[in-house]
Image (tube, grey):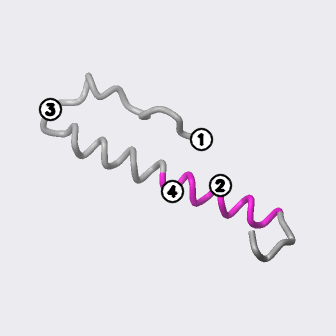
Amino acid sequence: MLSQIPINLEKVIKADVDREILRAGIIAELDAINLYEQMAAMTGNENI
């Protein structure tokens, strides 16, 4: 799971920093969705 930005932004050229920040956010969201789906598959409670 992501808990840190997966790229060193100090090494990214200034013009690409915003793009890389958005990319890291999207990756984190996809990781969260995968976690939720895995946990939902493990429970028998339909309310979870």
Name the residue beneath numbered marker 4.
30
Question: Along the horizontal axis of the image, is 1 left or right of 27?
Answer: right
- Residue toward you, 45 or 26: 45
Question: Along the horizontal axis of the image, is 22 left or right of 28?
Answer: left
The residue drawn where x is 43% and y is 34% is: 6
What is the residue that sits farthest to the top in this orientation?
Answer: 10
User: In the rendered structure, which amino acid carries the disc numbered 4?
Assistant: Leu
Checking the image for residue 1, the label placed there is: 1
What is the quadrant of the C terminus in the image? bottom right
Name the residue beneath numbered marker 2.
35
The residue drawn where x is 26% and y is 22% is: 10
What is the residue that sits farthest to the front in this orientation?
Answer: 47
- Please tell me which of labels 3 and 2 falls first in the chain: 3
Residue at mark 2 to residue at mark 1: CA–CA distance: 9 Å
Residue at mark 4 to residue at mark 3: CA–CA distance: 25 Å
Name the residue beneath numbered marker 3.
14
User: In the rendered structure, which amino acid carries the disc numbered 3?
Assistant: Lys
User: In the rendered structure, which amino acid carries the disc numbered 1?
Assistant: Met
User: In terms of secondary structure, where does tag 3 sit?
Assistant: helix
Residue at mark 1 to residue at mark 4: CA–CA distance: 10 Å
Q: Which residues are drawn in magenta?
A: 29-42
